[in-house]
């Protein structure tokens, strides 16, 4: 609510320059600057981790998982020891628990994905009403193994053995019967499963390094395509990194791996002044990054073995991807995936604060010293002031998906929501507890992007 309120304040502020005297604008700007510095979260803010509050008594990793024998809904015994030799996810929940019901889709998704790879799932319910328990299982279509003592959680021996004081809680047990991880966050279990099983699924690929002429010199780029597709026309996704990043950023690398495993080639590149590309960081602006992205698009569009082109952009790269898509004909872009798009950068410039560096927004210096040693040019601020981010992006009418986290302290997720509002028919994934880099489980984000692109291709008959 605060972020939406102050976003509105910025609109009023920019309009005031043409309606009131300069002195009044200075006063209003100073007021907004102070108010927003106090109100908006920063990257240093603590991320949401409920384990710190509700998981302190959970069983610890490295401990042998206590065995149990509970009854299934149809009265059959369920023993943990019967699953020795396999990874087992214990899902502690109850049909009367709202948070548990909210987590069911995530747990179901994990079950569908990892049960086929040999992971077993056991739901341990703290329901006392058998009929309510069975009704919930039917209502949500829960098909993995379920069991219960049919007693209150505080009276349950299983709850005591596993230190369960809060539900939902989940415990991952390894094939040797040892606790691998215990948490109240389902995304932590999913991330650990991805780490255990994803590396072996890394697709074989053919890698080509190249240089593309950009706005400030040559851009370093790399094309990866699934091995065996040489000479064949396949879809390609152009990957656009964020402010200060590079084509080798971990999140986009995972997205690329996932796309390759689905038969989609990727082209990642460094914007000017980043990574191995030419140009100076202090000369970088969103405008010349848009020019870079267009140059890369033109190169990709000229390749004989590319059938369709997608855009994937993270943070500032998301802003660039959205604006370039808006400037190109819809027929030229098969789909756009924005990950935590940093449309806040315009408001940050007006506020006089960019990623921890503060300045006079009405008269920014030629160079701004950024945390970490980078030097940001004043032109970046001056051009960001009037950047038509949403207005340009709104010209795109094709397929799109926006993924944003509620714990993003760099770009509040309301900025991602606005893309969803201007792009009618787009998909919106708001990831609870996820930060700006989706560090809670980047594998899940990679999977979401791949599912989006494959669905677009299937709809197009490919």
Image (cartoon, rainbow, N blue to C red):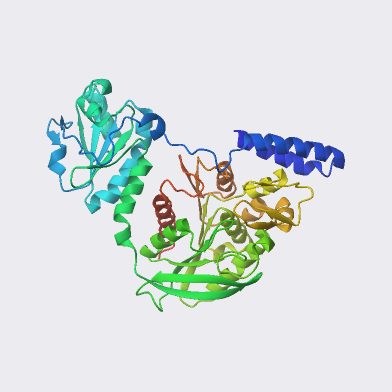
* Left or right for 74, reference 326: left
Pick the residue in front: 180 or 387.
180
Q: Quadrant of the N terminus?
A: top right
- Snapshot quadrant of residue 18: top right
- Snapshot quadrant of residue 141: top left
Q: Where residue 239 sits in the image (x, y, percent)?
A: 51, 62
* Left or right for 137, reference 298: left
Residue at image location 71% in from the left, 36% down from the top: 34
Residue 431 in view: yes
Q: Where residue 310 sits in the image (x, y, percent)?
A: 50, 63
Residue at image location 54% in from the left, 63% down from the top: 333
Q: Where residue 184 sits in the image (x, y, percent)?
A: 35, 35
Residue at image location 32% in from the left, 59% down from the top: 199
Residue 459 in view: no
Q: Measured along the vertical axis of the image, is residue 441 above or below residue 272? A: above
Q: Quadrant of the C terminus?
A: bottom left
Q: Where residue 63 sits in the image (x, y, percent)?
A: 23, 39
Pick the residue in front: 42 or 401.
42
Number of numbered discs: 0
């Amino acid at each position: 609510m605060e972020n939406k309120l102050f976003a509105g304040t910025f609109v009023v502020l920019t309009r005031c320059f043409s309606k009131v005297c300069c002195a009044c604008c200075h006063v209003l700007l100073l007021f907004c600057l102070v108010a927003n510095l106090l109100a908006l979260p920063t990257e240093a803010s603590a991320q949401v981790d409920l384990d710190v509050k509700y998981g302190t008594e959970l069983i610890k990793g490295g401990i042998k998982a206590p065995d149990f024998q509970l009854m299934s809904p149809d009265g059959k015994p369920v023993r943990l020891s019967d699953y020795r030799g396999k990874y087992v996810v214990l899902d502690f929940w109850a049909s009367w628990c709202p948070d548990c019901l909210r987590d069911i889709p995530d747990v179901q998704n994990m079950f569908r994905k990892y049960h086929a790879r040999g992971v077993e799932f056991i739901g341990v319910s703290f329901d006392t009403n058998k009929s309510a328990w069975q009704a919930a299982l039917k209502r949500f279509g829960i098909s993995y193994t379920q069991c219960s003592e049919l007693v209150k959680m505080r009276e349950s021996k299983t709850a005591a053995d596993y230190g369960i004081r809060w539900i939902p809680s989940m415990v991952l047990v390894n094939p040797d019967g040892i606790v691998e991880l215990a948490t109240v966050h389902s995304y932590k279990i999913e991330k650990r499963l991805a780490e255990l099983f994803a590396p072996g699924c890394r697709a074989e690929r053919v890698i080509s390094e190249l240089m593309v002429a950009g706005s400030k010199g040559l851009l370093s780029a790399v094309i990866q395509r699934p091995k065996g597709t040489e000479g064949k026309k396949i879809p390609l996704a152009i990957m656009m990194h964020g402010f200060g990043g590079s084509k080798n950023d971990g999140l986009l690398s995972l997205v690329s791996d996932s796309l390759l495993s689905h038969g989609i080639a990727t082209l990642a590149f460094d914007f000017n002044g980043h990574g191995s590309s030419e140009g100076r960081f202090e000369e970088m602006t969103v405008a010349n990054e848009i020019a870079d992205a267009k140059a890369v698009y033109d190169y990709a569009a000229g390749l004989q073995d590319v059938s369709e082109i997608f855009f994937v952009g993270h943070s500032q790269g998301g802003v660039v991807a959205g604006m370039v898509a808006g400037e190109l004909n819809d027929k030229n872009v098969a789909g756009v995936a924005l990950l935590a798009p940093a449309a806040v950068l315009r408001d940050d410039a007006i506020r006089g604060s960019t990623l921890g560096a503060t300045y006079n927004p009405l008269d920014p210096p030629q160079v701004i010293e950024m945390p970490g040693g980078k030097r940001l040019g004043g032109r970046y601020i001056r051009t960001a002031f009037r950047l038509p981010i949403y207005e340009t992006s709104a010209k795109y009418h094709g397929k799109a998906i926006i993924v944003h986290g509620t714990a993003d302290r760099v770009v509040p997720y309301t900025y991602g929501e606005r893309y969803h509002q201007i792009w009618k028919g787009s998909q919106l994934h708001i990831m609870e507890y996820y930060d700006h880099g989706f560090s809670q489980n980047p594998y899940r984000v990679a999977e979401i992007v791949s599912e989006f692109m494959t669905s677009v291709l299937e709809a197009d008959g490919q």
